[in-house]
Amino acid sequence: MVVWYVAYGSNMHAARLGWYIGGGCPPGGRRTYPGCRDRRPPSRSVPVSLPGGIYFAGESRAWTGGMAFYDPQLPGEAAARAYLVSEEQFADIAAQEMYRPAGAADLIPATGAAIEAAITTGRATLGPGRYETLVCPGSHSGVPMLTFTAPEGASASRCRPPASIYLGMIARGLREAHGWPAERITSYLAARPGVADGWPPDAVAALVSEVLVDA
């Protein structure tokens, strides 16, 4: 079975997702990833928009600062990128986001059941922590789209500004996936809860301009 893994944060940047698939530690990161059991790259990627929005909260152990989460109840649309992967690869990406070993024997059947439940009902929970709630926002070309987020939405979270390296990766991902100009990326990111609370718009604009120089 194949599914679309929908990334709305730093994994919109294909090189960033590559560390989840192939393993290793990305430049500037604080965490080494074991990678997926199946290390083949996604067979396709497409830009998508999800109903709702993203917000930043918690504390990233990989980058420091707030992490991006998807909340379908927020107004507007969340820009995202869908990657066509196997169900096994999706399970291994999810495991690494949850700080569990890829291929963990107890997680494989649980993730498979959660995928089926999310496809059927739109939502399923693997645990109480970050990125342990699976959401199926629909399908693309007849294949289900799946992403993961926190169990609570933005209204129940204490939003926190993201680190510059993390926000810069999201900016690169938006350019790669959607081809947006710097001005649109800046306005999109600057309005996200967590960014709006801690990043002045001119600082977001400067960061976006800097990271997109070679993009």
Image (cartoon, grey):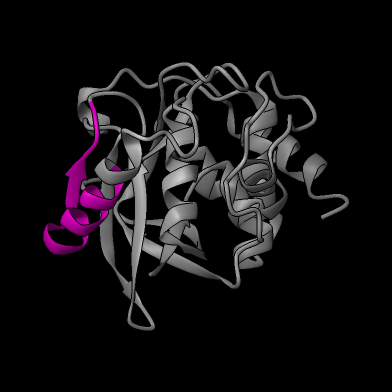
Furthest residue toward right: 214
> What's the magenta bit mostly, secondary-structure-wise?
helix
Residue 62 x, y percent position in the rendering:
60, 22
| Drawn side of residue 136 relative to residue 147, left or right | left
Does residue 113 appear in the picture of this structure?
yes
Name above or below for residue 51 compared with residue 134: below
Q: Is residue 104 magenta?
A: no
| Drawn side of residue 26 relative to residue 118, left or right | right
Name above or below for residue 57 compared with residue 7: above
Query: Residue at 52% across / 43% down in the picture?
Result: 9
| Drawn side of residue 201 relative to residue 29, left or right | left
Closer-to-camera residue (127/174): 127
Quadrant for the N terminus, please: bottom left
Q: Is residue 114 magenta?
A: yes
Query: Residue at 79% across / 42% down in the picture?
Result: 211
Name above or below for residue 70 compared with residue 115: above
In magenta, the rendered stretch is: 111-127
Residue 78 x, y percent position in the rendering:
40, 54
Query: Residue at 68% across / 38% down in the picture?
Result: 23
Residue 79 x, y percent position in the rendering:
47, 57
Q: Quadrant of residue 209?
A: top right
Does residue 72 appear in the picture of this structure?
no
Q: Quadrant of residue 43?
A: bottom right
Furthest residue toward left: 121
Quadrant for the C terminus, please: bottom right
Query: Residue at 22% across / 32% down in the picture?
Result: 151
Furthest residue toward front: 105
